Image: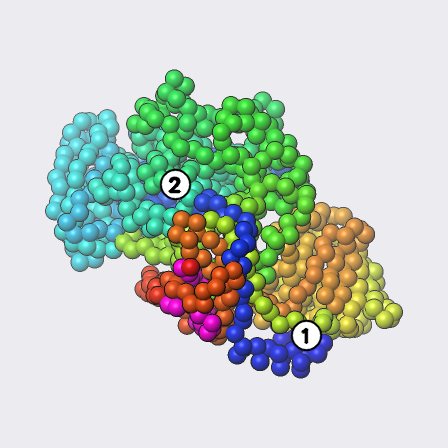
Amino acid sequence: MTKQRYLLPLLASLFIEASAQVPSVIDIDLASHGDKVYPTMYGAFFEEISHAGDGGLYAEMIQNRGFEEGVIPSGCTLENDEVWAPKKPCYTTDKVNNWHIRWNAERKAMQAWTVEAEMGRADYEITTDKPLNDATPHALRLKLNNEQGLVTVKNSGYWGIGTKAGESYDLRFFTNAEKPVNVKAQLIDEQGTISKSIYMKCTPMNSWEEHKVVIRADRTSGKAQLAITFEGEGNVLLDYVSLFPQHTYNNRPNGLRADIAQYLIDMHPSFLRWPGGCILEGINMENAVDWKKTLGDPVQRPGEYDLWGYRNTYGFGYHEFLQFCEDAKIDPMYVCNAGMSCLFRGGDYVEGEELQEMIQDCLNAIEYAIGDQSTYWGHQRALNGHPEPFPLRYVEIGNENVGPRYAEHYKLFRDAIRKKYPQLEIICALMFHPETPDCGDMDLFDPHYYENADWFYRAAYIFDNIPSQYTSNIYIGEYAAGGANMYAALAEAAFLTGCERNGERVRMTSFAPLFQNIHNGTRHLICYDNSQVFGRSNYHVVKMLNENRPDYNLTTKIKREPSVLCGNMMDGKVGLATYGNDVEFRDFKLEYVFGDVKTSENPATDTANWTTEMDGNNRFYWFKHEGNVAYDISFRMKKNSGKEACRVIFGGADIKNFYMADIGSHQNESTIFGERTDGDYTNFFTYRNVESIEQGRWYNVRVKVGMSNWQIYLDDRLVEDYRYDFALERHYAVSGMDETTGEVIVKLVNGENSPWPVKLNLNGTKAKVFAAHRTTLASDSPKAENSIDNPELIIPKEDDIEISESPITLPANSFTILRIQR
Ligand code: AHR
């Protein structure tokens, strides 16, 4: 950060200049035997977000196949074009969240569909008059008449339908006609027809008729549409129009896109988590994923509005998930709702008998997976075509939950599951939270990290010193570095070296979100459109790590020169900022370490001491006096509106460059330190605390800015204590032993935009020269990333090299894995 002033800056810069040329020495102790790295380490997290299933892994090609897209989320109400969650108290605050979103039912209902008449305007509407079944009550009614001529209904799929020349597709749809009607189905694109036309008739009058035909594509196209043309008179209802490639992964019916499934399998995930994510919590309890409704004939599956902005067909359901895991030899992880909905949405919860029903529902889901056929749900599984149990291994109770109410629910679920299914591994959804140790028995708990890249570099060592109260093993169920580029992928790689080094405690990780249709989403691991699939650079990081997992770690030390930097002076502007919300401040004090004190009664009115500046909706109050060396900032504060509370600024240059104590950060979950550099925010914390700010309550806030230690006190209680290391390290190394091959596996992360010369010392052997196989993922630019137009810009390259006493040079922006033969 440019504004920061170091002690001994000249000496520091000389050291940095010189060290750029000198190879780092990495000592690897071959006789050591560090933490085991479990085969479970790298898995995958599935959630229906960014068209992960619908428009992604799930091979259905028709979007909005049942005309149900306009249906509002279960349990919600529609008020003046807004959908509102039930006004029930949230499980963390006991207050109503008043969650709502805008809703345009009419536009949504016809999503991906168009209707065209040969002559004039086509006459049609969405109706619930004669439901095909309870799951798909809406249908498209065409009012055919002679004046319109032929009427064609088209579906554009998920941003076009992807066809392949010579491949066959199963078309299934239902009609209900008043009079006999001729029907023609074909695939078309901008250049015309791309399949032979299939002719059918709607014969039965006023009852539903199912049509099943096969369409063969003559041409490969990424922009195809399905066109169904009607010729006749009178009303015709059309519903549940489904088009599936005949070739799916493992050729399963209602199956998965083979290319996407294979791409995931090629990453070798040891486990797959389903169904999420926030969607298993739901906007409210009724909106949460209901596994039972995801079973059976897809035409009988109602689907549900997905809180990520579109309707989930439930096509990639519980059975398909378990089947895929079995086929691909991946351990399934089922996640149940813990009796509470997402606290960022409605956040309602159940208690008493309703909670017992939820617990039973979770046991039923487990029974569906592993109960034998004599059990009710085991029998249902057999009826669905799978008599033998599926290999369910893990159950997570809830997702990203917080607080004592969750802890109580967790214990009830856990006890019931342990009693009936002691063989399962149980995951607690709490992170590093005060309640986590109190929950007692758990196999793993599940911290999530969505931070920026620099946080991930800094966090490479956090698991070396896990606070002693957290005794259970760790599953990092979701992580992703912001930035979506090579710099972020390398930051994640650095972080994962720390996970491997502490593999006895960090047993499992999964990046999130996993899948992304390129038309919806920004930073996921595996991306695709309707015809192509590719991995972002961090997909290759995880794949490389999985393919080169050692059995145990070897002690690995990068010899760094002792730091000549001895602290930093937080000179610079001091102030307060709000997040477009209403916060009152009183009794502001800036106390310098040398004894001087500057005060102000109220920043909003004391114009002699403060200036105001706006950054979008965010208001900055700049104090007249600057911070100098080390100091305390204290004041009283009351938040009157908004989720987050305020930011205490120090060491500032301007509104885009400063350090801060973020009071009520992460949507009011935490109170932590951070910085803003050229407009980008970075959070500083090792284990994020749970310190939210209540609305309407006065707090005494004190921020102590030391030269390397910063603290935040709320009402005289220390809530955050952070050691600020201003040198951001971007060189990381970890190594381990592959017991099967006898190879030493060395992983090296170079997050710098310059080459890294490295000299490897393999201590504990007399040999001086070793043959090694090298896999390198590198990019010319830290900002580069793979894309649909350039999907292989950053992919691993392999070669064989010799490791000797001479240093090797790792490319700029690279992740290198060496398999060294001894
Ligand atoms: O990965 C997207 C979302 O991020 C998940 O649903 C949720 O668990 C997290 O907040």
Does 808 lie within the magenta span? yes
**What's the magenta bit mostly, secondary-structure-wise?**
strand
The answer to whether 11 is drawn above or below residue 164 in the figure is: below
The residue identified by callout 2 is: 330
Amino acid type, callout 2: Ile
Q: Quadrant of the N terminus?
A: bottom right
The residue identified by callout 1 is: 564
The answer to whether 374 is drawn above or below residue 219 in the figure is: above
**Residue at screen point 49% across, 29% down:** 423
Q: Is residue 73 visible?
A: no
Which of these two is toward me, 770 or 791?
770
Does 803 lie within the magenta span? yes
Q: Tell me the crowding category of disc 1: few under 14, some 14 to 19, or many 20 or more residues within 10 angstroms, Cα based.
A: few
Q: Is residue 216 left or right of residue 130?
A: left
The span picked out in magenta is 801-821
**Residue at screen point 76% across, 60% down:** 703
